[in-house]
Image: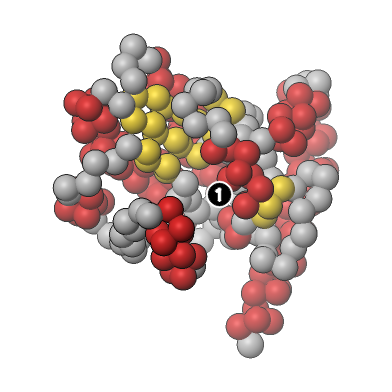
Amino acid sequence: LHVDAFFSSEERYAAQIRIHVFDLEKDDLDTLREVLEGLEVGILVNCAGIGPPLVANFMELPEGLPSKILRVNIVATVKLIEITMPGMIRRNKGIIVNVSSITCWRPLPYMSAYPASKAAMSFFSEALHDEFKHTNVHVQCLMPLLVLTKIASYSPDDEPSIFVISAKDYAKEAVRLLGNWSLATGCVKHDIEVAFSTLIGFWVFKKLFVPLGLLGVHRKRVAEYAKRMKLDGD
C-alpha cells in the first residue's frame, strides 16, 4: 500500500481516509461487516483479485489455487455487495463497480479458474444492474484487457505499449464512465482491441490464437516476471 499517497490525497481533497488491511483469501469474510460498520458507502469498487502464477493445466497448478482464485475473485465480491448494497438502496443512491476482465468472454484453457471467475463476475454484475436499474443504485462491470499490473505479470519497470495501458491511465479513463454504462472495457484503447477481436471466429480463437498466440506470449511473460522477482529477492 502506498500510504503516503493516500494521506496526500486526504489533504488535497479535504477528505477523510481510513485504511483497513484485509486478506480476502484467508480472513473471515463475515468480519468485513464490522470493518465497514458506520460507514455510508457511496461508491464500492471491487478490484481485488488473484490469478494463477503460471500457465498450466488444472492438475499442474498448486493444490487449492483454483478455489482460492474463486474465493477472492467471486465470493469476496459478493460478500462486499451484500454488506454495502442495502444501505445504498435505503438511501436510493450509490455506484458499485466490479472489475472483471476481457478473459471472461471465452474459455481459456490452461488459465481456467481465472477467466471462469471473471465470467461469473460479469454475469452477476449484469444481472444486478437489471434488477436495480429502476433505482439510483448503478451497478457497473469493467472488462479491461492488458493493464500494467502484477496480476498480469508486469513489473513497475515495464512500459506501456500499443496493447498495454498503465494502471494510472486506465483509472483516469475508467472513472469517467462511473454511472454511465453497465458494461465497458474502461478505456478507448481496449475498445479498439475488442472491436478487432470480434472479427476472429471462435474456432480460430480456440484452435490457433489461444495456443499459438495468447498462451505462448503469456507463458513467456510469466516466466520472465518470475525470474525478475527471484533476482530482486536475492
> Which residue is drawn at the image coordinates 22% and 46% (left, top)?
39
Vertical arrangement, residue 204 with respect to residue 14, above or below: above
Q: Is residue 197 visible?
A: no
Residue 154 percent coordinates (x, y): 68, 60
Residue at the disc numbered 1:
58
Residue at the extreme top of the image, as rendered: 134
Vertical arrangement, residue 146 with respect to residue 3, above or below: above
Residue 96 percent coordinates (x, y): 39, 33
Residue 165 shown left or right of residue 71 in the figure: right
For residue 173, which quarter of the picture? top right
Residue 24 shown left or right of residue 194 in the figure: left
Residue 34 percent coordinates (x, y): 17, 53
Residue 172 percent coordinates (x, y): 60, 44
Residue 20 shown left or right of residue 170 in the figure: left
Q: Amino acid at mark 1?
A: Phe
> Which residue is drawn at the image coordinates 44% and 69% (left, top)?
3
Q: Is residue 163 visible?
A: yes
